[in-house]
Every structure is written in C-alpha cells, then in structure tokens.
Image (cartoon, helix red, strand yellow):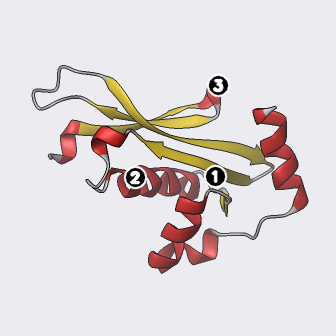
C-alpha cells in the first residue's frame, strides 16, 4: 500500500469526504470510503465514517479520519465527534484535543436535518 495510491477529497456540496483508491498504477478512481459531516457555525460534526469491507484492516479508516481532522483544523473549525469511530480515534491522537468540542443538541439537529 503506497501513500500515493489513496487520496481523501472533500465533496462539500454533499457534506462528506471520500477516500479514493487510485490503484497500484494510479489509473483507477474508486470511492472506497466516506466520512459525512454537518456544519454548525465554526464546528464540523463528524457523524459517519465507513470504509469498504474489501479494504478493512489496512488502516484506511484512520487515514481518512486524520485527513479530515487535519482539513477541519486547517480551516479553523472545531471538531464534534459523533461517529463512534472518530470518537474512539481522537483520544489516541491528543494533538487534536484543543480542537474538539462536546456534542450539543444543535449538533444532533444538524445531523438529523441532513439525514432525514
């Protein structure tokens, strides 16, 4: 698995990031994972992460979350971990602790508005 093979891209009009597998030779463009979000002011609610079963156990979920969290921090936003995977990942990476906020009712309402 090479670093250049996998790429994370934001799809802002669909409120999610996708994990792309470009294949060993760089010619593919298969979406193999996603992380969905809702924005509440300057807070980004990360509420769903998934990676295709065919790619499980390769550390790609972590790669996806790290890229998203780095993007959120770089944009000056704060992270609201609602997704269980993200909520478990963040304590293992304490360098992001200052950028995390606890879930509030308006975060749940924002997610519900996107998923209903």
First in residue order: circle 1 vs circle 3? 3
Look at the picture and state if 95 lies above or below 22: below
First in residue order: circle 2 vs circle 3? 3
Badge nearest the viewer, 1 or 3: 1
Mark 2 and 3 residues: CB-CB less than 8 Å, in contact? no
Look at the picture and state if 73 lies above or below 97: above
- Identify the residue under disc 2: 61
Q: Provide residue 78's location: percent of width, then percent of height.
A: 67, 61
Look at the picture and state if 11 lies above or below 19: above
Distance, label 2 to label 1, CA atoms, is 13 Å
- Closer-to-camera residue (62/98): 62
Distance, label 2 to label 3, CA atoms, is 22 Å
- Closer-to-camera residue (92/72): 92
Q: Provide residue 92's location: percent of width, then percent of height.
A: 45, 77
Classify residue 82 as left or right of residue 61: right
- Identify the residue under disc 3: 13
**For the residue carrying disc 3, how many other residues have a C-alpha within 10 Å: few (<14), some (14-19), or many (20+)?**
few
Q: Provide residue 99's location: percent of width, then percent of height.
A: 62, 69
Q: Residue at x 68, y 59 (%)?
A: 82
Classify residue 112 as left or right of residue 22: right
**Among the 4 quarters of the image, the one containing residue 32:** top left
Q: Residue at x 32, y 24 (%)?
A: 30
**Among the 4 quarters of the image, the one containing residue 97:** bottom right
First in residue order: circle 2 vs circle 1? 1
Classify residue 84 as left or right of residue 68: right
Secondary structure state at the residue bearing disc 1: strand
């Amino acid at each position: 698995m090479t670093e250049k093979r996998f790429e994370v891209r934001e799809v802002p009009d669909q409120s999610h990031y996708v994990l792309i597998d470009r294949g060993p030779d760089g010619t593919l463009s298969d979406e193999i994972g996603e992380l969905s979000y809702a924005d509440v002011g300057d807070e980004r609610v990360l509420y769903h992460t998934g990676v295709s079963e065919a790619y499980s156990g390769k550390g790609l979920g972590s790669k996806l979350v790290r890229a998203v969290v780095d993007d959120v921090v770089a944009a000056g936003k704060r992270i609201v971990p609602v997704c269980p995977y993200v909520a478990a990942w963040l304590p293992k990476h304490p360098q992001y602790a200052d950028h995390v906020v606890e879930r509030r009712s308006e975060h749940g309402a924002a997610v519900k508005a996107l998923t209903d």
